[in-house]
Image (cartoon, grey):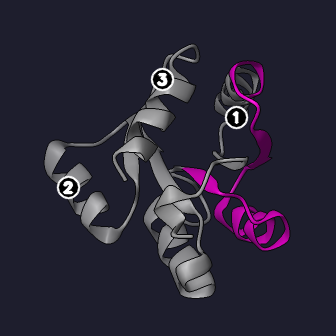
Amino acid sequence: MSTSSKKVERVLMVDDDDNIRLIAEMSLEGLTDWQLSTACCGNEALAQIEQHHPDLVLLDMMMPDMDGIAVFKEIKARFGSDAPRVIFMTAKVQTQEIDQYISMGVAGVIMKPFDPMCLPDNINQILATN
């Protein structure tokens, strides 16, 4: 089964902001049946991926230890074809940057701040096009 057609069951939310993680967690746990885990930095995210094998990683772009691009590249290097799909989450992005991220292999980009009531639908829309 290809990665793009795999059903989402486990999601890892990576963000250095406690409030963003809490809001996303409440949204995704309340509106989906996904198993959610969280990480506050890139290194913790890589350890969580190794341990829990999520189907999807929601990855903040700006974090203090490793930015989202560095984490994404490390995910691809470590896990290769078994890497989970990744959606970047960022407050600062321009159209050409989104195109660059997509060409790198991310599933999509969600702008922050996001609407917690729409977050699962936004994720599903991105995954449906991949």
Quadrant placement of the N terminus: bottom right
| Vertical order, 126 against 117 (above or below) | below
Residue 97 falls within the magenta-colored stretch: no
Please identify the residue farthest to the right as the structure is shown.
51
Q: Secondary structure at mark 3?
A: loop
Residue 14 in the image, given as x and y percentages of width and height: 65, 49
Residue at the extreme front of the image, as rendered:
1
Counting from the top left corner in percent of width and height, residue 104 is at: 32, 70
Is 6 above or below relative to 110? Answer: below
Dot 2 or dot 3, earlier in sequence? 2
- Three-letter amino acid code at disc 1? Arg
Residue 67 in view in this figure: no
Along the viewing direction, whichever of 11 and 41 lies nearer the viewer:
11
Question: Which tag, 1 or 2, sits closer to the chain's start?
Answer: 1
User: Can you identify the residue that label 2 sits on?
Assistant: 99
Residue beneath disc 3: 114
